[in-house]
Amino acid sequence: MHLQIAVTSSPAAELALFSDGLQRLALTYESQTPYSPFFDPMFFVLRRKSLSECEALTVQLAQFLDSKQVNERTDDDKTLVLATRRVV
């Protein structure tokens, strides 16, 4: 298992942690950078939800990760944690 860390002085507005089972979907392999078409729709929805609405998102995320489309691309474990900072 490998953990990649990037140190920055800029505050993070959004954060994604994922297991290696999702790297083929979540990364642009050549540059080892996030694949925007994978993350953008999820963060778009997450930014607009209140904390009380996040439990429903958890169920939807679990369904997505166990979907036929995702399972066809990986046979490994699939864990995804998303966080966004809401500035008030």
Image: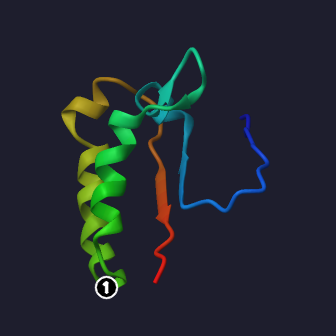
Residue 36, position as x, y percentages in the image: 40, 36
> In this figure, what is the number of numbered marks?
1
Q: What residue type is labelled 1?
A: Ser
Q: Judge whether 21 appears above or below 28 on screen.
A: below
Badge 1: residue crowd in 10 Å (few <14, some 14–19, many ≥20): few
Q: Judge whether 24 appears above or below 65 on screen.
A: above
Q: Quadrant of the N terminus?
A: top right
Q: Which residue lies furthest to the left in this view?
A: 68
Q: Which residue is drawn at 28% across and 24% down?
A: 72
Assign a secondary structure to mark 1.
Answer: helix
The answer to whether residue 3 is left or right of residue 66 is right
Q: Where, by quadrant of the figure, is residue 71 drawn? A: top left
Q: Residue at x 34, y 23 (%)?
A: 73
Q: Judge whether 21 appears above or below 73 on screen.
A: below
The answer to whether residue 8 is left or right of residue 12 is right
* Relative depth, front residue between 62 and 13: 13
Q: Mark 1 points at which residue?
A: 52
Q: Residue furthest top?
A: 30
